[in-house]
Image (cartoon, grey):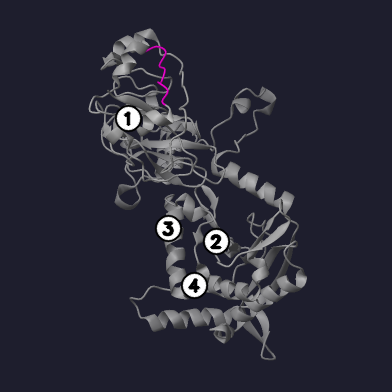
Amino acid sequence: MAEVKEFTLPDLGEGLTEAEVVRWLVEVGEVVAVDQPVVEVETAKAMVEVPCPYGGVVTARYGAEGEELAVGAPLLTVAVGADASAPAAAEGSGSGGADGVVAEADGADAAEDGGAGETSGAVLVGYGTGAPPARRRRVRPTPVPAAAAAAAGQVNGVASGYGRHAVTPEVPVRAEAAEPAPGPVPVISPLVRRLARQNGVELRTLTGSGPDGLILRADVERAIGEAGAPAAAAEPSAAAASAPAADAGEVRIPLRGLRGVVADKMSRSRREIPEATCWVDVDATELLAARRAMNAAGGPDAPKISLLALLARICTAALARYPELNARVDTEAREIVRLERVHVGFAAQTDRGLVVPVVRDAHARSAESLSEELGRLTGAARDGSLTPGELTGSTFTLNNYGVFGVDGSTPIINHPEAAMLGVGRIVPKPWVYEGELAVRQVTQLSLTFDHRVCDGGVAGGFLRYVADCVEQPAVLLRGV
């Protein structure tokens, strides 16, 4: 006899408490295997395909596409066991359909499932290869109207209107969850989907201008303009909707998703870290010349080395000399924790906001390897395909704000790191070179550091070494 198991949204790490359902990968009544991805969700950090730890038949789905679910909230229920080939669990027939109660299962029952109790090999934070919890949570969703339940009928004795958010092919709970035509919509970004949904634009009617017909934000905005509807800059909050007429000129943007996470992290950094900043103007002419020479030596078909990769290589060499800055502070233990491995994060501006992809073990990479990995992560950041693991664990951050056309900045440290190097734009300026006035390519470097891990002497020494390597790249050869 089949047993109905409830699969909840797992903990996706980094303190994330919610995720948005982007796309369901399975239908109600479909047979799923252990560890098969069943839904694609977007957290504040990345798009994630969530695998189901059970094998059997999907009896209910929770949450429409575009809806936010909290960690621990039900995602779907699966009928597992000897009768898993049936589209629903037989014990549901006695529930009356309206109450929608999921039977509780203890750890011993789960262990005795035989083939249905196959252990999941996928590991997300909160579930995986460990033993199941002692008791599963009882869920009592709001009953669906009797008319809807009657229209939907029953599937093997289980009401197809099961649960407040249960979605079935016959009776979709939300209109936006049911697509008007079969086949996938060529959209990657959830922001594009949300913008279209807010303005009533049907994505299937658009022809994408991106690669392979990919629908971009510009395509949706063009459709909104042609329809004469103003593009919604943000989904208005309930408070803004109920605001008095006197506040009609206000625009309220909820601090949630990526923007909310960034706000919380930056606020925590400013509260906890006593930061200081020092900076220096440097002549980058020789570094640019060295990059041109390296790329020319590789030939026309060789991958090009980026300027950011050379700066990252310089930073790893500087951190080897000044390990105090590759550290974090354990406030509870009142200890400075120095880290042996260098994972370099770099700030990347995307349509979703500011993200910091991480190059793992940057200290063990060559300039060419750094350039290749930086390019891969930058592309993934732009199309929203970065995984949570590629956005966490940095020990030092490199921030090239020169791409915005600015010379200097005093950035906020990426908590819990101890330092961040900022690089301004490189522009031709008059400069005294070898005793004579000349036009050179000049940039400004700034180092923001945690004053708890070191004093100004260490920070100044680190910045001066970086500056010397930029002005004379041959300085790097001394440590090779």
Q: Viewer-proximal residue, 284 or 233?
A: 284
Q: Earlier in the sequence, mark 2 or mark 1?
A: 1
Marks 2 and 4 close (CB-CB < 8 Å): no
Question: Within the magenta stretch, is there residue 94?
Answer: no
**Furthest residue to the left?**
85
- Out of 414 and 435, give the one closest to the viewer: 414
- Image quadrant holding the N terminus, namely top left
How far, Cα to Cα, is label 3 from label 1? 29 Å
Q: Which of 188 and 264 is in front in this view?
A: 264
Q: Which of the marked residues, 4 or 3, is nearer the chain's N terminus? A: 4
Which is more N-terminal, label 4 or label 2? 2
As measured in the structure, the alpha-carbon distance from the residue carrying label 1 to the one carrying label 4 is 48 Å
- Dot placed on the residue nearer the N-terminal end, 2 or 3: 2
Magenta-colored span: 97-105
Element on which disc 4 rests = helix
CB of mark 1 within 8 Å of CB of mark 4?
no
Amino acid at pointer 1:
Glu
From the image, tell me which residue sits under label 1.
179
